[in-house]
Image: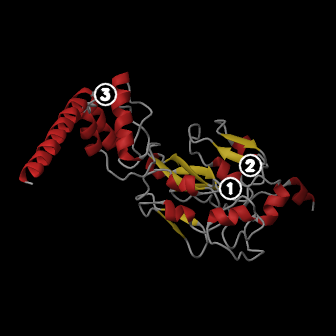
Amino acid sequence: MMDFILNAVLVLGGIALIAALILYFCSKKFAVKEDPRLALVQETLPGANCGGCGYPGCSGLADALVKAADAGSIEGLSCPVGGPDVMAKVADLLGMAMANSEPMVAVVRCNGTCENRPKIVAYDGLRTCSAMNSCGAGETGCGYGCLGCGDCVAACQFGAIAINEETGLPEVDEEKCTSCGACVKACPRHIIELRKKGPKSRRVYVRCVNKDKGAVAKKNCKAACIGCGKCAKECKFEAITVAANLSYIDPAKCRLCRKCEAVCPTGSIVALNFPPRKEKPVVEESANTPLTNKEDKA
């Protein structure tokens, strides 16, 4: 009996030893060497794993950065959460030069407040923007504007966007926004856009995405763009185009002169973080003002 047990132990021990040797040689032969820079880059990244960079988490971006560095350039790759400071550290680790990129921020291109765009029907269903959008135009006559259910709020991991209860529209906190683009992807109507933050956080853009003809758009929302083209005619820098009954301001060409804002008949063009306009002085007529020829004859 003891010999049987001893033989079994020896056989099993021999099998285990052979299996261990096979695994050892396989691990050596098929080993994948990890670039030590990969761990360093991943540690430098913020670890938010938001996907705003276009890769599945910070590990995916780190891998892409190391491969791009081996190819000779990391231009086009960026971490929206870490921003220029983090990317500068990554560039130093990889021995690359990094061009300065302008900070971006999310903007909500809809001014369909409760006052400007009243509700005409009541929606009784799943309270998400994607579900409501699938059902039709929503609760107002505008089939393009914000639905106000807060899909963008749920998508933001940084608490940078919230629904204003008074207006029913989402508002972006510039200080918290990392321009990760999660809110842009979450909006089924594409009313949220990433734009350059601008000098002193000043931006000029059309706060409307309605492509209906002017009369229909104005009927459904008082602040809708009616595609009249007055803003495009006023702009001397060719920064404004009108297509499909809708104006759009190119942030790369806009010089922030605000002349388009002044001529917009519906107020759909917004200028953020600018000082108030100076009011033109009213010239009062003096009693000594000379009479005109017509007044003399009278």
Residue name at image x 54 percent, y 50 percent? 203
Visible in this render: residue 72? no
- Amino acid at the residue labelled 3: Met
- Amino acid at the residue labelled 2: Leu
Q: Which residue is mark 2?
A: 246
Tag 1 near tag 2, CB within 8 Å: yes
Residue 103 location, x and y as percent?
A: 43, 45
In the rendered image, the quadrant that contains the N terminus is bottom left
**Residue lying farthest to the top in this orientation:** 72
Nearest to the eye among marks 1 and 3: give it: 3
Secondary element under disc 2, as helix, strand or loop, is strand
Nearest to the eye among marks 2 and 3: give it: 3
Residue 202 location, x and y as percent?
A: 50, 51
Marks 1 and 2, the one that precedes in the sequence: 1
Secondary element under disc 3, as helix, strand or loop, is loop
Residue 112 location, x and y as percent?
A: 68, 65
Quarter of the view holding residue 163: bottom right
**Compared to 266, does 163 lie above or below?**
below
Q: CA distance from mark 1 to mark 3?
A: 41 Å
**Left-right relation of 280 to 56:** right
Tell which of 198 and 42 is nearer to you. 42
Secondary element under disc 1, as helix, strand or loop, is loop
Q: Which residue is mark 1?
A: 208
**Compared to 25, does 275 lie above or below?**
below
Q: Which residue is mark 3?
A: 96
Q: Which colouring convention does the figure follow?
A: secondary structure
Crowding near the residue tagged with mark 1, few <14, some 14–19, many ≥20 C-alpha atoms within 10 Å: many
In the rendered image, the quadrant that contains the C terminus is bottom right
Q: CA distance from mark 1 to mark 2?
A: 8 Å
**Left-right relation of 42 to 76:** left
Crowding near the residue tagged with mark 2, few <14, some 14–19, many ≥20 C-alpha atoms within 10 Å: many
- Amino acid at the residue labelled 1: Cys
